[in-house]
Image: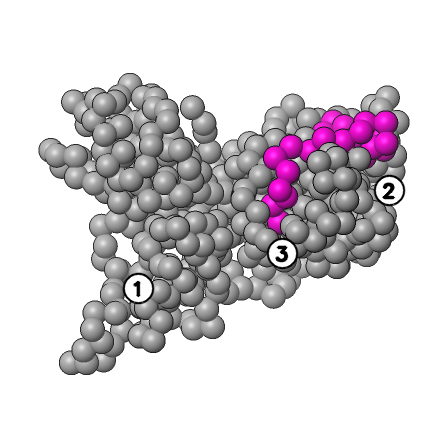
Amino acid sequence: MLDFTANGNDSSKKLRVEDRMESPPSRVLHIRKLPSEVSETEVIALGLPFGKVTNILMLKGKNQAFLELGTEEAAVTMVNYYTAVMPQVRNVPVFIQFSNHKELKTDSTLNQRAQAVLQAVSAVQDGGSPNSDNSMLDSVLAHAPSPVLRIIIDNMFYPVTLDVLQQIFSKFGTVMKIITFTKNNQFQALLQFSEPVNAQQARLSLDGQNIYNSCCTLRIDFSKLVNLNVKYNNDKSRDYTRPELPAGDGQPAVDPAMAAAYNKDSSLLGAINPMSAAAAAAAAAGRMALSGHSGCSGVLLVSNLNEEVRVYGDAQRVKILYNKKDSALIQMSDGNQAQLAMSHLNGQKMYGKIIRVTLSKHQAVQLPREGLDDQGLTKDFTNSPLHRFKKPGSKNFQNIFPPSATLHLSNVPEDVTEEDLRLLFSNAGGIVKAFKFFQGHKMALLQMSTVEEAIQALMDLHNYDMGSNHHLKVSFSKSTI
């Protein structure tokens, strides 16, 4: 089914070769150790948070699959994320790596079911309805085990309220009940739809999506519960079918008129993109950045350190390890920033080497005692002018993206030309493939030939003095030229 003809169709040899060697980036990913009963939908779901899935090939006899994403950049982001966070299917760890294949060629007649499931899931992503005529879509949605979803919020830079969740999920059906709570220092929620099919559609569309740009990531699975018992209507729990419930001791009561309005029309935001609706709701409520509300310390252990971690948060202190000079402890402002830096930077290539980023057991980087010479291995950057995220709710939080070959430039002086910037970034070591000014002349997009070159350019040129007190601001962009 996969194009192995060049090697006598010996797929097993091909797979063993892939096992032994680290393949270069490709938009085709090889997934191993899948549980034997896994479905096409579950494999596709692994890739959905990172971009469009364009092809799939199941090798069920070998407990393996190949997944093709729309772009190589999406595949790199997926592999980097699952390097830091072990992917699981049906509570079984699976292994994901780049395939040697640059494109997945499948025999459509032998791969019909997988292709039909792929089209069905794409239809859901694009706003397909459970009432669609697509029989495979109906089949995929009909396998929902429960109307209750368990929701975990990762990278929670902004508060996520019960009302925000209601607005996001009500696009997919009637939200009956919500209970929010904190477990293992993580914000979680249980949300009950009127029908299991609505829960399945919401899970397929929203799992892995960000409520706000690059933060507050939804991790969604089915709960073992089939019905929620809500005793109080307040800011922690809500039964939209029973607006008369009491608020409970010491809890802010819910306005009965608002509860009734939600109960009568759960599709108030029906035509609005759910992520935009949530962002608008939070903005109206005066959202604030959280500090220290994650389940980890703010300290990272980084091998092959460079200060480009600041693009994902404010590095407060850095300590190079005395006996291992290529590794360092980096203290970020809080645990959320540490997790964000780890998920985006672990596995990236820098100076020709793959850097490794993990959470440290240390809660803080200690400064050397006064009078003790530590050979300059520890630095305090608390008062550095380079911090991007000092202000709670800063717009910089909305522009955090994974490393990409395209860079966003801002604070560009009016007299600086495209040729000036091309030359500046070429001198940083790399090839500038494309360039575009926008917002008049104040901002630009600049594309390097590789992600590694873009990382190097960002490290070298962020805060570069362009003259007349103009310091160039450089960050990764989600756009392409």
Q: Can residue 477 be seen in this view?
A: yes
Q: Position of residue 109 (x, y in %)?
A: 86, 27
**Pick the front one: 410 or 25:** 25
Quarter the C terminus occupies: top left
**Pick the front one: 234 or 129:** 129
Identify which amino acid the numbered label 1 is placed on.
Answer: Arg
Q: Which stretch did the figure color magenta?
A: 97-124
Q: What element carries label 3?
A: helix
Residue under numbered circle 3: 20
Quarter the N terminus occupies: top right
Classify residue 181 as left or right of residue 443.
Answer: right
Classify residue 89 as left or right of residue 365.
Answer: right
Between disc 1 and disc 3, whose residue precedes?
A: 3
Task: Identify the residue at horizontal 68%, vertical 30% (top origin).
Answer: 54
Identify which amino acid the numbered label 3 is placed on.
Answer: Arg
Q: Where is residue 426 in the image (x, y as percent from the top left)?
A: 27, 33
Alpha-carbon span between mark 1 and mark 2: 50 Å
| Number of marks in the rendered image | 3
Say the numbered circle drawn on residue 317. 1
Q: Farthest residue in the top direction?
A: 440
Classify residue 408 as left or right of residue 105.
Answer: left
